[in-house]
Amino acid sequence: MPTYILLSVLTPEGVQTIKNNPSRIREVNKEVEQLGAEVKAQWATLGQYDFVNVIEAPDEQTIARVSLELGSRGTAKYESMTAIPVDDFIASL
């Protein structure tokens, strides 16, 4: 299944939500599954992005739907990108 990287930056509303209800992070992961994708790994990070997620989804349309649905809530901004395994990348050259 294709792998995608989803980078998240919390808005002020998102920071407040996480501060008041830290378990909301895991609830969102369950919502991602309901949209047809699966969070395989997740890190809270310092710097430009607040979270880095590795997500498997059947296709680009699914990850686009995940990004749009989550982004429409106004609690975070999302950037998604396709992750290509290095061996596959080398083989394509």
Image (cartoon, helix red, strand yellow):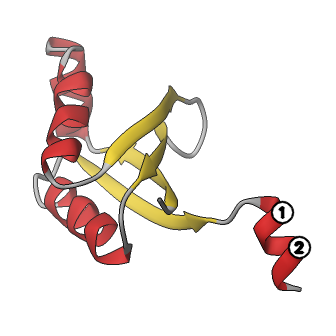
Residue extending farthest to the bottom is 93
The quarter of the rendered structure image containing the C terminus is: bottom right
Q: Mark 2 near mark 1, Cβ–Cβ under 8 Å?
A: yes
Is 92 on the left or on the right of 80, as rendered?
right
Q: Quadrant of residue 87?
A: bottom right
21 displayed left or right of 82: left
Q: Is residue 82 visible?
A: yes
Q: Residues within 10 Å of mark 2 (few under 14, many from 20)?
A: few
Q: Amino acid at mark 2?
A: Ile
**Numbered marks: total:** 2
**Height in image: 51 above or below 82?**
above
Residue 86, quarter of the rendered image = bottom right
Q: Which mark is residue 87?
A: 1
Q: Is residue 50 visible?
A: no
Q: Residue at x 61, y 37 (%)?
A: 47
Q: Position of residue 62 (x, y in %)?
A: 27, 68
- Give the distance between the C-alpha atoms of the residues marked 2 and 1, in whole angstroms: 5 Å
Q: Secondary structure at mark 1?
A: helix
The residue at 21%/68% (across/down) is 65
Residue 23 in the image: x percent, y percent? 20, 14
The residue that appears at 14% across and 60% down in the rendered structure is 69
* Residue nearer the viewer, 60 or 5: 60
In the picture of the structure, the residue carrying the numbered disc 2 is 90
**Does 44 appear above or below 13?**
above
Foreground: 56 or 53?
56
Q: Hey, what amino acid is under mark 1?
A: Asp
Q: Which secondary structure lies at badge 2?
A: helix
Report crowding for label 1: few under 14, some 14 to 19, many 20 or more residues within 10 A (C-alpha).
Answer: few
